[in-house]
Image: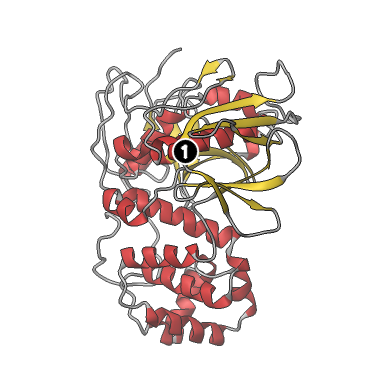
Amino acid sequence: MVRGEPKKSFSIRSKKKVKSDIDRISTGSTDQRPTVKVFLPNGEFRSVKCGDTTDIKDIIHLVIESLGVNVVTAHIFYGMRIEHPQSQRAFWLRRWFTIQEVRAKYEHMLPLDECRYTLRIKFFPENLTNFYEKDKASFFFLYDQIKNDYLNHVAEKVDQDIAFRLGALEMRRHFKDMPANALEKKSNFEILEKEVGFTKFLPKSIVETMKSKALRKILNSYFRQYSDLDEEQCCHKFLGLLAQIHRYDLETFKCSLGSGWTITVDIVIGPRDGISYKAEQGSVITHMTHFKRIQGIKVSRIASSTVSMPSATDSLKATVNLRVEGTSEPLVFTTSSFVQATEMAELIDGYCQLVGNQKQSLLNRKLDDRKLPNVPGTQGANGSQTSSESIPTRHGSLTSTTTQKDEGNNSGPVVYPSDSIYFKLPKTTR
């Protein structure tokens, strides 16, 4: 079912998924290449069959296509991270890196057997309404990402009134056909509490400390206020309300202004604000420059080193130099490591292309003895054009429409509808 279509009936009770014959057949693939699990914001994952020479770009394209995303127009928004949940450390992966290169780069920084790959929206759109109209699948993907980030990292800090409003909006969106007075019935409330859980909507502290009767009464009063909203309206209302207390479209980097360590600030980067900063103890954002004014980006190590790959002891400071239109001196940021400087520069470079209308990369540096490419094009691994046809599926679903190409030459992806969807990437050599 395409996300956004109305359901014919309402039921709080969960249903167990029954495996079909094709589910069982798909796990018996003769492809012996290793499987990479790519986790989505909603907690589900896609399993990708790939070799050591498969690059991150191909994996991103294949997974987002299975979610119903138009790869040609929307791939620029997406990125993949390698994350270590226990330490909460995460690093963005460069699109042209192969799986083998990713392992070589991070094996000294993270325990790879405890890490996982995650697909996320890396570059936020300027206007969420326009984003919804152009690509509904990507919009709902972004909504899931923002909502889950809120519940995991922000919810415990917000005012209780805001927390209930956000929770009620997510409940309305999740249960599109639930009557406005459904929570007045104790039995419905208990089913919802047992089979779904309120921590999917509310901060854990509220759920654990508030008595059930009081929780039902308060939640019901908020839920009734949004009973007339459809799924799209709930999403926009949720995102608008959350934006008042949490700027989810900004990414923050702790660094210093200039080439020395004199003034430590938080550099914040986002599509609407461009590049700004705020004092560590302050909350006021001071604008520095727009992406359209940036003419060049350079990343440099402060200390000379022959190390081509950062290690667990990578303490070398680095600078990000921005050449800005109308200024004689570059805008310089000093970071605590080369990895941080690179991530910051690549984020700025991506927004320069997405928001600043730059046609190609502005980065001017050598990285790992490889030239930084422009924004990835729409060609597949075999040189053919990537199809712009999207697969009409709900991105949170584990079922996809099967798309097949000629398997005789192993030239294209095959998406299997199963609990762990396998995407067959072409075998290539370098």
At label 1, the amino acid type is Gly
The chosen color scheme is: secondary structure
Residues 150 and 430: in front is: 150
The residue nearer to you, when weighing 369 against 21, is: 369
Viewer-proximal residue among 261 and 254:
261
Describe the element under mark 1 as helix, strand or loop.
strand
Is residue 82 left or right of 358 when viewed as pictured?
Answer: right
Q: Quadrant of residue 381?
A: top left
Q: How many marks?
A: 1
Q: Is residue 180 visible?
A: yes
> What is the quadrant of residue 283 in the picture?
bottom right
Which residue sits furthest top? 430
Viewed as shown, does residue 394 lie left or right of 46? left
Which residue is rendered at x = 37% and y = 77% of the image?
A: 226
In the rendered image, the vertical position of residue 117 relative to residue 429, given as above or below: below
Mark 1 burial class by Cα count in 10 Å: few <14, some 14-19, many 20+: many
Q: Residue at x 42, y 87 (%)?
A: 184
Image quadrant where one finds the N terminus = bottom left
One can see residue 421 in this view: no
Residue bearing mark 1: 79
Say which residue appears at 23% left-offset and 68% top-offset: 8
Q: Where is residue 156? Give x, y as percent.
A: 62, 67
Question: Residue at coordinates 58% horizontally, 66% vertically from top-left?
Answer: 155
Residue 54 place in picture, x, y as percent: 45, 23
Q: Position of residue 112 (x, y in %)?
A: 64, 34
Residue 401 spot, x, y in % from top left:
27, 43
